[in-house]
Amino acid sequence: MIVALKPKTPEEKRDDLIQWFKEMGLEVHVSVGKFQTILGLVGDTTKIDMDLIDSLDIVDSVKQITESFKCCNRKFHPDDTIVRVGDVKIGGGNFCMIAGPCSVENEDQIVTIAKAVKEAGADVLRGGAFKPRTSPYDFQGLKGEGIELLKIARAETGLPIVSEIMSVADLPLFEDVDILQVGARNMQNFDLLKELGSTNKPVLLKRGLANSLKELLMSAEYIMASGNEQVILCERGIRTFSDYTRNTLDLSAVPMLHELSHLPVIVDPSHATGLARLVPPMAMAATAGLADGLIIEVHNDPPHALCDGAQSLRPEEYAKLSKKILAIRAIVSE
């Protein structure tokens, strides 16, 4: 249920109403916008007399929410959420460029790439330390050592780092990682999502291989309902009957998610297409489609990459693409 308060409602009256709702056993989410304050009520709202609430002099309107996702619902929080990572802002008109290799291989590789993508305009460095692979015989990542190498690259460049976490048991290793990524295969790992909800770190949540937008939002709800509101949604392509690309990039998900939710939405054209030559056009299309950012794989030697070299751009290719992205952003943000 949503209770919209009238503009210039005194804080004392607002707090009294919130306390009353809490005494009824409801959880209250407060969203203070430019012109109006929204109270989002979570719990058994059947005991609430909507007519009574609507008659209060400080209440503008009362509405029931039919969607099962509440915390991430734009009706709960009309203004865009801005996720902050140091000086970097994601969402609310702020565009974030995330770039780096699929997997961290050694110190020279990750530091070289980190310096190159920063020079090209990247805001955040990505790098996989734990790699979920379809085959148990493929490279699984350097794990803890990979995290340490990412931290070295951060010290060298000043770029915040994002890396994928696969298990609750690994959480202590990610204590000094700036953004925790939940990959497509773990989008519905609910124990992991709830645990990440108890942290104070931003979470980059990727859409699953065959999951609907509602299921993606419900996964975000697990994180937010546990107390962490710093969630970034990521469209990374879904599995269809396409036989020429790794996945099908669902760009319509970007405006639809913006309509449904207040959370930032970024796009991963690398995993969506699986082919480096398709990354630039899809990245530009995502930018034109009002995505809040891009996460792109960059490798200094793609043919010899230990993971996903075929979809990785070279640093010089990324630099060229970044200039085009900035030009498109200048147009769509007018």
Image (cartoon, rainbow, N blue to C red):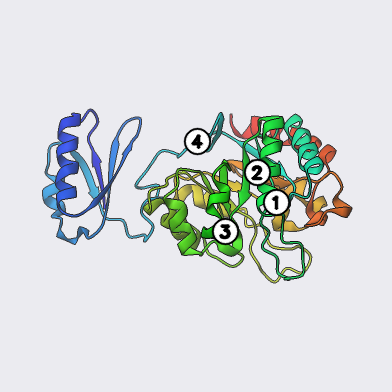
Query: Viewer-proximal residue, 288 or 321?
Result: 321
The residue that mark 1 highlights is: 269
Say which amino acid is labelled 2.
Answer: Leu
Badge 2 vs badge 1, beta-carbon distance below 8 Å: yes
The CA distance from mark 4 to mark 3 is 21 Å
Residue hosting label 3: 207
Tell me the amino acid under the disc marked 1. Pro
Above or below, 331 relative to 150: above
What is the CA distance from the residue labelled 2 to the residue labelled 1? 8 Å
Residue picked out by circle 2: 294
What residue is shown at x 66% (from left), y 39% (from top)? 151
**Quick one: label 4, few (<14), some, or many (20+) residues within 10 Å?**
some
Quarter of the view holding residue 308: bottom right
Query: Sequence-wise, which precedes: disc 2 or disc 3?
Result: 3
- Return the residue nearer the eye: 90 or 3: 90
Can you identify the residue that label 4 sits on? 92
Task: Report the front residue among 79 and 271.
Answer: 271
Residue 307 image offset from top left, x and y in percent: 78, 57
Q: Report the side of 208 relative to 149 (left or right).
A: left
Q: CA distance from mark 4 to mark 2?
A: 15 Å
Q: Is residue 43 left or right of residue 17?
A: right
> Label 4 vs label 1: CA separation?
21 Å
- Say which element carries label 2: strand
Q: Earlier in the sequence, mark 4 or mark 1?
A: 4
Kindly tell me whether residue 284 is visible in this rendering: no
Residue at horizontal 47 percent and vertical 44 percent from the top: 230
Mark before the other along the chain sequence, 4 or 3: 4
What's the residue at 60%, 64% (across, down)? 185
Q: Residues within 10 Å of mark 3 (few under 14, many from 20)?
A: many
Q: Secondary structure at mark 4?
A: loop
Q: Disc 4 residue type?
A: Gly
Helix, strand or loop at mark 3: loop
